[in-house]
Image (tube, grey):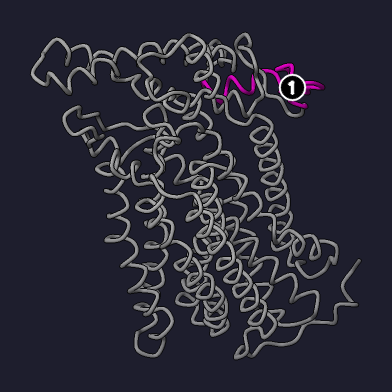
Amino acid sequence: MDIVELSRLQFAATALYHFIFVPLTLGLSVLLGIMETVYVMTGRPIWREMVKFWGALFGINFAMGVATGITMEFQFGTNWAYYSQYVGDVFGVPLAMEGLMAFFLEATFVGLFFFAWERLTKVQHLIATWALAIGTNLSALWILIANGWMQYPVGARFNADTMRMEVSDFMAVLFNPVAQAKFVHTVSAGYVTGSVFVMAISAWYLLRGRHAEIAKRSMTVAASFGLASALSVVVLGDESGYTAGVNQKMKIAAIEAMWNTEPAPASFTVFGLPDLATHTTRYEIKVPWMLGLIATRSVDKPVPGIAQLVGLAHDRIRDGLIAYRALEAVKTRPRDAALRATLDAHVGNLGYALLLKRIRPDIENATEGDIRTAAASTIPNVPVLFWSFRVMVGIGFWFIALFALAFWLSAKRQLDRYRWFLKAALFTLPLPWFAAELGWIVAEYGRQPWVIEGVLPTALGVSNTDPGNVLFSLIGFVVFYSALLVADVYLLTKYIRLGPQTAVVPASRPAEAVTE
C-alpha cells in the first residue's frame, strides 16, 4: 500500500471508530431533554432518576466521543497537508465554528448537567440539559457543513495567484443543500440509535424483572421518539438521494450498479449481483419508476449510467487540460489577460485534469490512453456501494417496524407482556451502529476518487511523508481506539447491570411469567 492508501485507511479507521460514539451521543442528549421535561412538568421523582441513569450512560459515551474525535482533525495537518493548504480557507471555517459555537457549549453544559442537580432549580437544570443537546447537535451541524462542502463545493473559487480555493460566498457554504440534507439525515439516524439503545436496555430489564417502572417509561419514550426518527431517516434519506442525483451522479449510478443509462423514469434495483467483469448486474429485481423519482423528482428525466458518466469524465478531463496549461502559463506571465480569460473559462474542470497526476507527472503531455484510464478511475467500488446501501436500507425498515410495534404496545400498556418482542428489541441493539457505519461508507467511499468532489483528487491531498510513519501511527490508533471501545463497552455494561440504584420502584413479575 502506498502513502495514499495508507492515509485513506488511517482516516477511515479513525472516522469509523469515532462514529461508533457520535450517534448515541446525539440520540441520548435529546432523549435526556425529553425525559427531564416530563420530570419538570409532572414533578414525579421517577423521571428524575431516569434522567440520571441514562445521563450516566450518556456521559461515558460522550467522553469516548471527545477522545476519538480530536485526533481526526489533527490528521488534516499530518496526513493531508496539501489538502489543508489547498482548501483550508474554506474547510477550516466550519471546523473553527464547531469549536467556538458547539464544543464549548457542550463542555460548559455537560458539567452543569452532571454536577448542578442540587445547585440549580428544576427549570434551570432543564435549560442546561437542552443546551447540552443543542450543543451536541450544533457540533454535528458544523462538521457536516464541512463534509457537505467536500461533497458539493459551492461558494468557493480557485485563486490562480495563491493556488488555493477561497471562500467567495459564505452563505452558500453555510446553506449548502447537500450539507443540510446530510445534517438532518445524520442526526435522525443518531436519534434512532439513542432510541434503540434505550429500548434494548429497557427490554433487558423487563426480561429480568428489574426496574420495571423505569424500563416501561423509558421504552415508551424511546418508542415514540424512535418511530418519528426512523420515519424521518427514510424521508430525509430520500432528500440525500436527490441531492446526490444532482451533483454526484456517479455515486448514484454505482449504488444502483447501473452500467448504462435507462430510459426515464429509471427503475430502482432491489436485488441484483453486480458483475465487474462484464459490467452487468445479474438476477435483477426492479421497482419501476422509483429511482427516477428519487434521483430526479420527475418521470421524464433519465438517470445517467456508469458508462455514460465515464464518457462525460473523459470530456471534462480534456477540457480541464486546457485550464491546466493556461495555469502553468499564468505562472510565468501573470499579467496576460488572455491566459487568465482562458483559465477562467475552463477552470471548472481543472480538478478532472488533475486526475492524470496519479498516472503521470507531466499531465500536459497525457495521451488518449492516459485520459481514458483517468476517466475510468472515477468509478467507485460498485459492489461495496451496492450492498452497503441495500443492507442499510433494510435495517432502516426493520427499525420502523420495531418502533411501530413498540408504540402500539405502549399505547395498550403491554410492553412487558410478550417475551419475543422484548428479545427482538434486545437483539436489535447493535444494528443502528452497523447501519450508521454503512451510511458513512456509502457517503465517503462513494465519492472516490475525489477528496473534494470534482476539485481535488484524493491522491493529491496527502502529505509527502514516509509510508512507514503512517503505518506505525495507523497501528497505534487501531490499538488505542480498540482499547477505548473495550473500556466504553465495559463501563456501559457495568452501569447497566447496576441499574438506576436510587430509584424506588416496585419490582416487576418474574421473567418466566412473561407471555411467550
What residue is rendered at 77% in x and 61% in y?
427
Asked whether 71 or 473 is in front, the reply is 473
What residue is rendered at 22% in x and 17% in y?
344
Tell me which amino acid carries mark 1.
Lys
What range is drawn magenta here?
273-296
Asked whether 62 or 351 is in front, the reply is 351
Pointer 1 residue: 286
* Quadrant showing the N terminus: top right
Would you identify the image quadrant in which residue 73 lies?
bottom left
What residue is rendered at 46% in x and 46% in y?
184
What residue is rendered at 43% in x and 10% in y?
315
Query: Could you tell me residue 46's position as x and y percent?
Result: 58, 83
* Mark 1 neighbour class, 10 Å CA radius: few under 14, some 14 to 19, many 20 or more: some
From the viewer's perspective, is 80 left or right of 260? left
Query: Could you tell me residue 166's position as x and y percent?
Result: 22, 36
Is 295 in the magenta?
yes
Asked whether 241 or 317 is in front, the reply is 317
Residue 64 seen in render = yes
From the viewer's perspective, is 274 left or right of 437? right
Residue 308's place in the image compared with 124, above or below, is: above
